[in-house]
């Protein structure tokens, strides 16, 4: 974990504790070592920052971020400092896949948003990329749920002037079932849905979107 990463996370956590009504629950569920995929809902541009604050310094979280963000004069340098890797969302990105696999093979932590894009009005149907990475790497998945960041709008507001209630809930880690051979799209989508259901169980009803559930995972 780089000194810059530690410094940024520490400063951001101090800032959000002072300016916002910030609450984290379930940190005891974070595995202390080994490969890990953090799977979260996605409400705002600033969610990656809140993932790092929520998980804290127990793990160095790395990201796949859409390639266009790296061209932004403010976001680009920050993404590189945090150790993010560009992702081409218009097709299969072999470079991003190799980055993810190499990271997990060395017991790293990869954060993914299974929905593939922001959905501030509630959970939307998940894509299947997370399933392929989880099955190929064997890494457990840590479900987390963020609420409140949808009010911030742009990235700078959430990063530098956070206000109001922001909640970060961490569920228990789980692994996908072992499957031999190549899986079809139907199975991949079913497994993606099962990941989203874990996230949904950590969310209030208003945020559950297309994955409504009457049950909650207690953390």
Image: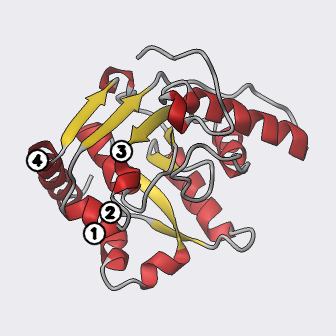
Mark 1 or 3 closer to N-term? 3
The image shows residue 201 at horizontal and vertical percentages of 55, 24
Q: Residue at x 18, y 53 (%)?
A: 12
The image shows residue 48 at horizontal and vertical percentages of 39, 55
Of the pair 139 and 25, the residue shown nearer to us: 25
Check disc 1: other Cα within 10 Å, few if <14, some if 14-19, many if 20+.
Answer: some
Viewer-nearest of labels 3 and 4?
A: 3
Mark 3 or 4 closer to N-term? 4
* Tag shown at residue 101: none
Query: Image quarter for residue 146?
Result: top left
Please state if 177 lies on the left or on the right of 105 as rendered.
right
Viewer-nearest of labels 2 and 3?
A: 3
As drawn, 182 above or below 98: above
How far, Cα to Cα, is label 4 from label 1? 17 Å
Disc 2 target residue: 82
Mark 4 or 1 closer to N-term? 4
Mark 2 or 3 closer to N-term? 2
Q: Tag 2's secondary structure?
A: helix
Disc 4 target residue: 14
Q: Tag 1's secondary structure?
A: helix
Q: Residue at x 52, y 35 (%)?
A: 206
Callouts 2 and 3 close, C-beta under 8 Å: no
Disc 1 target residue: 156
Q: Residue at x 58, y 15 (%)?
A: 215
Q: Tag 3's secondary structure?
A: loop
Disc 3 target residue: 148
Of the pair 183 and 166, the residue shown nearer to us: 166
How far, Cα to Cα, is label 2 from label 4? 18 Å
Callouts 2 and 4 close, C-beta under 8 Å: no
Mark 2 or 4 closer to N-term? 4
């Amino acid at each position: 974990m780089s000194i810059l990463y530690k410094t940024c996370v520490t400063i951001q956590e101090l800032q959000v504790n002072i300016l916002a009504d910030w609450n984290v629950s379930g940190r005891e569920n974070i595995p202390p070592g080994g490969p890990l995929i953090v799977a979260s809902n996605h409400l705002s541009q600033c969610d990656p920052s809140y993932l790092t604050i929520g998980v804290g310094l127990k793990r160095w979280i790395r990201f796949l971020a859409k390639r266009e963000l790296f061209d932004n004069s403010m976001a680009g340098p920050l993404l590189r400092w945090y150790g993010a890797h560009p992702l081409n969302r218009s097709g299969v990105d072999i470079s991003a896949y190799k980055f993810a696999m190499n990271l997990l093979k060395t017991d790293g932590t990869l954060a993914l948003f299974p929905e593939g894009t922001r959905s501030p009005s509630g959970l939307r149907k998940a894509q299947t990329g997370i399933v392929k990475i989880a099955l190929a790497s064997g890494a457990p998945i840590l479900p987390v749920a963020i609420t409140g960041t949808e009010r911030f709008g742009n990235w700078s507001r959430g990063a530098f002037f956070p206000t109001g209630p922001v909640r970060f809930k961490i569920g228990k880690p789980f692994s996908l079932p072992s499957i031999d051979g190549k899986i079809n799209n139907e199975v991949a989508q079913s497994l993606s849905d099962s990941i989203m259901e874990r996230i949904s169980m950590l969310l209030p009803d208003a945020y559950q979107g297309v994955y409504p559930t009457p049950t909650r995972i207690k953390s």
